[in-house]
Every structure is written in structure tokens, then in C-alpha cells.
Image (cartoon, helix red, strand yellow):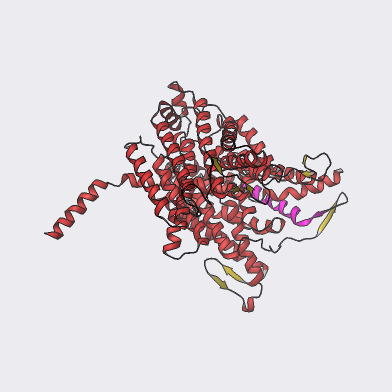
Amino acid sequence: MGIQQYLAFTVLGFGYGALIAGLAVSYRSSKVVNVAAGVTAAYVAYVYSSLRGTGTLKILVPIQLTPDEQPLATPIAMLIALGVAALLGVLQYLLVYRPLARASEMAKLVASAGVLLTLQAVIVLQWGSNPVHAPAILPQTTVKIFGIPMPWDRLLLAALVIVVTIALWLVYRGTRFGMATRAAADNSKGATLIGLPTGRIECGNWVISSLLAGGFGVLAAPTLQLEPTSFTLLVVPVLTAAIIGSFSSFLVAVAAAFGLGIINSLLTSFRGQAWFPQAEGVPVPGIPELVPFIILAVVLFLRGRSLPDRLTEKTAALPRSPRPRHVRWFVLAGLVIGLAGLAGLSYDWRQALINSMLGVLLCLSVVVTTGFTGQISFAQMTLAGAAAYITSAVGVSAGMPFPIPPIAGVLAAVAISLIIAIPARRVRGMQLAVLTLAGAVAAQQFWFNSPQWGSGLRPASIAPIEIFGLTISPSGSFWGDEAPSPGFGLVVLLVLLVVALTVVWLRRSPLGARMLAVRSSEAAAAAAGVDVARVKVVSFVIGGAIAGIAGVMYGYNLSGVSAERFGPLMSITFFAIAVLGGVGGVSGAVVAGLLVAQGLMFHAVTTWFGISPDFQPLFAGLAVVATMIGSPDGVAASLRSIPIGRLLRRRTVVLAEKEA
């Protein structure tokens, strides 16, 4: 391939810089790592597509703007789409981020994940999950550069990104609004004391952010595939470039975005070369997705510090992690309730109970890594998927008997946790969250979607549990042959109780105390003699082992494993639900397990009220946002704060008065 072809593919990679400016603006004003930036761009692009296709404005209910579903003119459709983008910015600020102004960065991150889930659910409900035609605004002709035809739209989009970036740099460096934005971002209280309208400044920045994301989404949609997942996951290279620019330098961030886009395009072109890595005669997939993760890991590791300065350390206000009490009674109650549910519930409710128990298992891994140690990681679902795939490979492909496959799966999750712990020794907070999210995307594309190492487009089967001559699976076991088998549910229940008791022991142990010290302040913990790096590594190993156990049990429950069940969006969803329940302890994980998709709570809602399961993602997103606003510490913390004894006494007095 000659220099002309390299130049052509370089130009084709310019589209990746489109969302950087909007993301940087929103973070500068509200200190939010906005994982919903990609889906915001997708939503506005969908709105524009409907206006240009049938003249229909789809927001909450379809509004027909033209007779006989005639297409709306391009300028009018673009103005309406940008108006929707501005409205999204205002609503996100007023309804979500303004109430969370004093909340921790983690609460804002989880709220952003709730916005992502909500908007993605709205897109699927209104437009479906199949790709939608994206009408082009920029010219689709080509121009020859060095004798190679270049697409005009990519060149114009890149030029527009550069112009907007320079304009933003000038605005934020030399105007009153820009200086006020920097002042409000650095010290909101101080800016308020000197008379700056910080609320209007932040709202204005969110409007600018949403306008940029939506506008570039409309322009870039024809160069990408307009469907929810591709736009949503575009946030990973966007966040990578934004972190390289330290979330403040527009020029560096956009330059990094162009670099990532060029690398992605060139790697895609290299797939046709003979020297490109191959497996079974097919180019290895996922390498373009693996590159942003590797670049981000190297940059953050070199830039990071093993220990933050005590005077500048910023710690996240995580939920309280109270010392567990009355453990034996709670274990007994859980065992009795679980056995009663498995024995007495119908098959659909029994499956919902098993799904909730599996959700509790996975959320317990988040409790260890985030609730106890303060490390924000989106890798737990990836670890679960890795354990499930290794269990499948060892049990089915290698033909090894039980219990070797699940043990190998858990050990694989532990090994990957050790790899994650290497950058975590020098990286923390939101940067670690973005790094693990990039790792989740890379794992799905490079491993899970690979037909050689993963399952490709078809699920990989998992052999059932066989012990003492008994076969235990959801389809049948020693206790019941109807699906899901109560016997399999009993195995899940016993595994859950053992893991929960382990987490309780960990919280009450000296190691748990050291974890909480690291969570509170790494510098102070080091000054007190705590080996911070070792505590982080141990927490990732324990959390990874629990995630691996959850992944193995998920695989047994489904009798197989598929890539979409352990993808990055599921990682975001489970982390958000774990924080929604409360990451401070086992009780929060139990509450979160009740709230998982296809769990007891959602099954009750869909069954009792006749609501379609298609609305579950929408309710999940809204519940995450509402909980973060009303109770950033999670539902379990709110329940613990209710004075049960006082309420019972008041109820008793009322009943006595009525009887008298």
C-alpha cells in the first residue's frame, strides 16, 4: 500500500474528533465525565433523520409537521434538531446535574450513566434497534488529492471540528463568559460570592455541549452507522482523547481525537495485508478497539502517581460502609426466604428470584472494589464474561470434568484483575473508570466477539454441573425437573450466602479497615503505615474473584455465554444499579439485585401492572437518575436511616387510640 492510500485512510479517520469539544465543555462547567455524550448525539441524529424522512418530530409522542409525511427541508429540520439538542442540555442540567452540584464525582458519573440508559431506551422504543438511514448534509462527492479520491464530507467535517475548536478556545480564553466558566469550575462558592450567576453559566455550558454533540452527530451520522450501540460506544475514544487533553485543553484533546481516528482507520485498512495477525485464516478482530485502551493505559500510567499529594488529594464522598451486625439472623432469614421462594414460586417468579440472586453476586464485587476501597471500575462485568468464556472453553472444548472448568474461569478473572491492578496503582477516580470502560470495549471486540477465542455471533455452550453422579442445571436437577430447576436455584443460593459471608468477614477484618482507610485518603493511609498499592491489588483480586464466580453462575444459568450479555453497556448498567442499591455493604448489593433487569422487582412491575418488558431499560435509567438525586448513597442507605422502631411505636399508638 502506497503513500496515497495511507493518506486516503488518514482522511477517512477524521470523523472520530466530532464529539470532543462538547464533552470537554460539559466537564469544564459541571465536572461531569459525560458517558451519555455519544447517545445524546445519536438521539439528535435520529430526530433529524425522522424530520428529513417523513417530517415527523419524535420526542415523547410523534408530531407530524408536514402533510402526507412529506420530508422537511434540510435547514428547517436542522434548526429543529438543534433546538431539541439545546432542550436536552437544559433538561439534563436542570433535572439531573444541578441537583447533584454538591454530590461526588461518582454520583454524577452514575447519573450520567442513567441518562445514557434512558436516552438509549427512548431511541429503541421510538426507532427500534436496527440501523436507520442517516440523510447527509455535507456533500457526498470526492476530490482528488495526490491523485487519490477523497470524500468531501470527511474533509469538511474535519475542517469544521478545527474551526469550532479554535472558536471555543478563543471564547473560553478571552471572553467574560469563558473567564466566568473557569472561575465557576475552579471555585463555585467563590464565584457565587463575587456575584457570578453560576447556575446560568453551567446551564449555558450544558446547552453548548449538547448543541455541539447533537450538531456533530447529525453531520457525522452518514459516515457511521446510525444505531444506538455504535454511537454510544463512540464515547470511549472520545473520553480517551479528552483525558489526554486533561479535560481542559481543546486543542490537545481534538489533536488526540484526530490521532485516534487516523490510527483506527489505518488499522482497519491493514486487515487486508498479509502480515496482519490472523487466526484460522481470518484477520484478528477487535484490534482497532484495543488501541485506545492501550494508549490510555500507557498515558495514565506514565502521568499518574503512586500516591496523591495530601494537600491536593480529592476523595470521592462514597456511601457509608457500616460494620455488619446481626449477621447470623440475616443469613438465616435469607436461607429461609430463598428456600421458600424456590419451593413455592411458579417457574417465572423462580427464574426472577435466581436472576436477582445472580445480580446480588455481581454487585458484591462492586461493593469490594468501589464500596470498600473507592476504586471506580467498569470492568466487573468484563471479568464475569471472561470467567464464563474460560469455563466454556475448559469444560466443552477441552472436555475437563467439574469442578475444573469453574475453577479455571474464576482464576482467569483473578488474573485479569491483577492486570487491571497495575495501572490502578497509579490511576484513580474518574480516570480509572474511563480506563476500565475502554478495557470493557476492547475485551468485547477482541475476545468475546472473536470466533476463535470467544463465541462470535453465536453463544458458546457451557456443560452443566455434574457432582456425585448428579447433573444440576436449570432444566433439571435432584430437586425438580421443571425449568428453572429449584435444585439449581439452591446451588445459586448457597454460593451467594458463602460469598456474602466472605464480604461481611472482609468488612470486619483488619484488611477491610485498611481498605476503608485507602478509600478515605490514600495519603493519610500511607502515613499511617498502610501499604496502599498492596491493598488496591488485593481488593481488585477479591472483587475479580467474586465477579468471576458471578460470571460462572450466569453461564450455568443460561447454559451458555454470548458477547452482548457481558459487553460494556452491561458493565455500565450493573455498576449504576450497584450504586443505586448502595455500594457500602451487602445490604446495598441485595437491594441492587432486586432491581436488576429480569429480577424480582421488574418482574413484579411487568406482571402486576401489565407493562411490557421493553420498557425495563427506560425504567432502569429513570430509576438510576432519580435515586442519585434523591439518595446519592443508594437505596439501602436511605432504608437504614428510617427509624423503624419509632414508626412501629407510632403505628402501635395509633391503633391503640382507634381501639379506645
Q: Which residue lies furthest to the top in this view?
A: 529
Outermost residue toward the left?
660
Image coordinates for residue 403, horizontal then vertical, percent: 56, 36
Left or right placement of residue 135 versus residue 317 in this view? right
- Residue at 76%, 61% (x, y): give it: 139
- The residue lying toward the viewer, choosing from 309 and 174, is 309
Q: Where is residue 142 in the image (x, y as percent from the top left)?
A: 81, 57
Q: In which quarter of the image is the C terminus?
A: bottom left
Magenta segment's dominant SS is: helix
Give the answer, above or below, for where 80 lies relative to 189.
Answer: below
The mark total stands at 0
Q: Can residue 317 be seen in this view?
A: no
Residue 327, image x and y in percent? Answer: 34, 37
Q: Does the magenta stretch include residue 160?
A: yes
> Which one is in front, 324 or 112?
324
Q: Residue at x 60, y 71 (%)?
A: 56
Magenta highlight range: 148-168
Residue 514 position by quadrant: top left
